[in-house]
Image (tube, grey):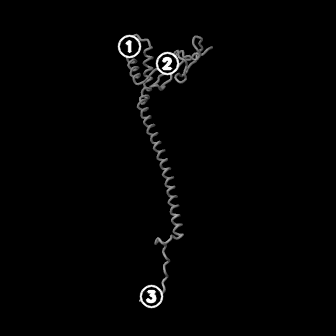
């Protein structure tokens, strides 16, 4: 049985056998390409920002590691500084005891041996006395307590040392208390 309703015929196909794309399909593919390109650019920018951020964090971490290592080395090298500083009054007392006149020679000799042993041990740890008497006054190494007029020595020369100063491994531990000469 044949159908009596007329059917619409399909348009003829071009020579290649495919139909031409509609203008709607063409604009959709252009929009899709533009969207993909925009997404690619956005991702490239985000990648560059993350790479830069990563490089900065890596540099920060490296600086932190170096600083921590340096502080650890300083702590090991100068960790005994406080203990040595606490012993300085004992060293001062031993030096004063040696300057005191006593009738007992053996006692003086014993104090001298103790003082020498203490000085040797502290020197091995890194303690060095600051040169003062006869030296030009240096406010970084000397603490001027007194000024005295003198024509015998140059201006700002240390003429007397009240208390010895010390450096510990090159760092000033205690400045020397001194008397400084001035011209009249």
Image position, residue 147 (x, y; %): 58, 17
Quarter of the C terminus within the rendering: top right
Residue 90 lies in quadrant: top left
Residue situated in front as seen by the camera: 157 or 10: 10
The residue carrying mark 2 is: 131
Q: Is residue 73 above or below residue 112?
A: below
| Horizontal and vertical percent position of residue 98 | 43, 15
Q: Earlier in the sequence, mark 2 or mark 1?
A: 1
- Give the total of numbered labels: 3
In this picture, residue 65 sits left or right of residue 134: left
Query: Which residue is disc 1 drawn over?
Result: 109
- Mark nearest the camera among 3 and 1 is 3
- Which residue carries the number 3 mark? 3
* Mark in the foreground, 3 or 2: 3
Query: Which quadrant of the rendered structure holds the N terminus?
Result: bottom left
Tag 1's secondary structure? helix
Horizontally, residue 144 falls left or right of residue 125, namely right
């Amino acid at each position: 049985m044949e159908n009596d309703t007329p059917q619409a015929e399909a348009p003829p196909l071009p020579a290649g056998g495919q139909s031409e794309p509609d203008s709607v399909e063409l604009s959709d593919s252009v929009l899709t390409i533009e969207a993909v390109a925009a997404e690619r650019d956005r991702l490239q920018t985000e990648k560059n920002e993350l790479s830069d951020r990563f490089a900065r964090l890596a540099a920060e971490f490296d600086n932190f590691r170096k600083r921590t290592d340096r502080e650890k080395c300083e702590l090991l090298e100068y960790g005994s500084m406080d203990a040595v500083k606490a012993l300085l009054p004992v060293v001062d007392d031993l030096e004063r005891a040696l300057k005191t006149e006593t009738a007992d020679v053996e006692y003086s000799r014993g104090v001298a041996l103790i003082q020498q042993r203490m000085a040797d041990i502290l020197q091995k740890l890194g303690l060095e006395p600051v040169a003062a008497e006869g030296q030009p006054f240096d406010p970084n190494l000397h603490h001027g307590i007194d000024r005295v007029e003198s024509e015998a020595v140059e201006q700002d020369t240390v003429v007397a040392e009240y208390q010895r100063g010390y450096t510990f491994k090159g760092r000033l531990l205690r400045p020397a208390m001194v008397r400084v000469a001035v011209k009249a």
